[in-house]
Image (cartoon, grey):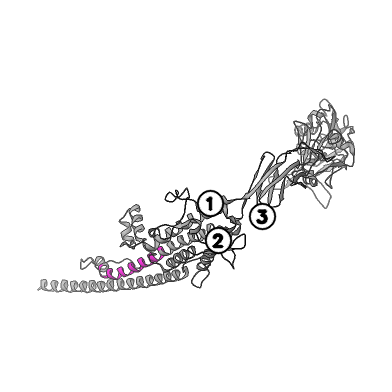
Amino acid sequence: MAGIRMTGLVSGMDTEGMVQELVKASSVKVENVKKEKQLLEWKKEAWQDLNTKILDFYKNELSALKTNSSYKSRKATASDETKISVTAKSGATNGTHSVSVKQMASSAYLTGANIKLGGETFSSYLTAGATTAFADMTDASGNSLGLEGQTITIGNGNALGDLTFVLGGDGENGVANISDLNKKLSETAGFEGLKASVVDGQIVFENTSLSKDEDGNETGVTFTVASDALGISGELAYKADENTGAVTSIKGTESAKYIKEFTSSQISNSTKLADLGIAVGTTFTVKGRDFVVDDKTTIADFTSSISKFGVSASFDQKQGRFYINTSGTGKANDFDITASDSNALEILGLGSKATKVDAKDAIIEYNGVEYSNSTNTFDLNGLSITAKGVTGQYDETTGTFVNNSPVNIEVAADNGGAYDTIKNFVKKYNELIDEMNKLYDQKKTDYEPLTEEERAQLSDKEAEKWEEKAKEGLLRRDSTISSMLSSMRSILNQSVTVTNADGTTSKYSLSSLGIVTGDYSEKGKLHILGDEDDPAYAAEENKLKKALEEKPDIFAQVFAGTKNAPGIGFKLYESLSDDMSFKANRSSAFTVYDNLSMDDEIEDYDDEIDKWQERLQDLEDKYYEQFAAMESAMAKLQQQQSYLSSLMGGM
């Protein structure tokens, strides 16, 4: 990049403009190379777009045309679609089939009895907290701790003496609970630093009096706490010390709980099974897997855990019932729930008062033969039959089946599917060769790629229209397009020999099946005689549909065939496969143009542009140096003239 130049200061000449005019001829050469590069990039883009369309045709419509199963599809119709639905595969046997549905497949369902209607009263043992009254505190078995009326003595070593509180007592020294005790400690001078709390049911005292004086020395109060009833006795220092054994907290030996009574109507997902009377250690078994109850197990824990055993379990709090079911149908998915204590099932409404619907297999008769399955769908003889309702009255215990109304299934060739395959091919083929012929015949215009200066003088819309014209004719008379068009037309004009059902052979071409080409101006486009979507030929007899009805077996040979006896579609598919095969000048398979060669040419243009730009810079620098020398010479001349003028003036 050139530096800032101060030119023309002495001569007064437009040096900048003169230099640009001098290098303009060489600049044109650079712009021409850029235009050639742009045209090649556009050409590559045109090939990429066409390649995408060819590949789409190859993978979809052409692939379907050359596939045998496209001409062997079957359709099945049920006489009563409220009882069964049916689809036919290519291997289904034509004709009438009889189906009776004896039994539908079902899941297993267990609906528990309503356990909220019992009117019973239960006791829940909850962990005590700061607001739990001392008088209500019990042990884990519900026995009172007998704290009411007992005392706790707290000292801080000062002359005021110790504090004694009566647990659950009234009056000035009475404390109803831990919160009440903390309040009185905080209101008594010298005892503010002692805090009581309940952690997992155990009463804990903590010394929080540690502080620092103005000199940074640590100070605090040492407390003593004693209560036989709480199992607490000891000294609490303001700072722990491992050497002396000093501690800052102490806790009681009792684990305090309290009893909360509730009724059946209050049972919820958070209710503990133990509170309902189910013993800790009770084992529930579902589908061979066990769940063991502990002292914290809730109804929600129970349903969540057994839902991992191949069933889905929930408790409806509003209905007061357990619902357990399997997602899969059939006997193999049936289940039972048992417990090590049978009374536990009764408590949860899952015992004798529960309602169980067993899982069942589906049972049908197909052409007089009975079949059973875990689901309602049967795959038989090329048919997929789904039972939707029973056709008679079946007693699984006795095996009797009465009042049966069998459903008839009619299976026939799906000629409509084969017709659509061929029609879709024709439509896509015509679109493709229209595009290829357009690119091959399109004439080149006089429009060239715009330079940056030219683009700046146009609006975006004007520039876009200009470039559209400049892109025309980039693939005109391209040999690859010509070769592909010629190959496709040649293959589609060929005849195929097929073997008839009686062993004789016949030759068929597209035209013999009612697929013809138009006049020469259409350049090979195909038409199906009598097709309703082709206005020019809709009035003709539809020979293709007629042939599909009369000779459906020939089409797999005509269009598909095998490698040894290829049909028209197979040949066209192989031809395009060869056109798109991997070659040295292509980056991958499924590419019909030499993209690597184009990339190399684009790189060559880049190199040439770089060289020309270097030459331009050198040429520009050369002219600026020459003008600079001229300016310097003129400046010296002016100095000499001034000097001479000054001498002459002196004389």
Q: Where is residue 350 in the image (x, y as percent from the top left)?
A: 83, 36
Up-down relation of residue 88 to residue 62 (above or below):
above
Q: Is residue 622 visible?
A: yes
The residue closer to the viewer here, 68 or 215, is: 68
| Residue hosting label 1 | 545
Instruction: Tell which tag, 3 or 1, sits nearer the viewer.
Output: 1
* Between discs 3 and 1, the one toward the N terminus: 3
Q: Tell me which amino acid carries mark 2.
A: Val
Q: How crowded is mark 2: few (under 14 residues within 10 Å), some or many (20 or more)?
A: many
Range drawn in magenta: 21-42
Q: How crowded is mark 1: few (under 14 residues within 10 Å), some or many (20 or more)?
A: many
- Give the CA distance from mark 2 to mark 1: 15 Å
Q: Where is residue 543 in the image (x, y as percent from the top left)?
A: 50, 53
Up-down relation of residue 17 to residue 518 (above or below):
below
| Residue hosting label 2 | 558
Quadrant the N terminus occupies: bottom left
* Between discs 2 and 1, the one toward the N terminus: 1
The residue closer to the viewer here, 237 or 74, is: 74
Q: Image quarter for residue 83?
A: top right
Residue found at x 87% / y 37%: 344
The residue closer to the viewer here, 177 or 536, is: 536
The residue closer to the viewer here, 47 or 179, is: 47
Most prominent secondary structure in the magenta stretch? helix
The secondary element bearing badge 2 is classed as helix
Up-down relation of residue 324 to residue 613 (above or below):
above
Residue 597, magenta (yes or no)? no
Q: Which mark is residue 91?
A: 3
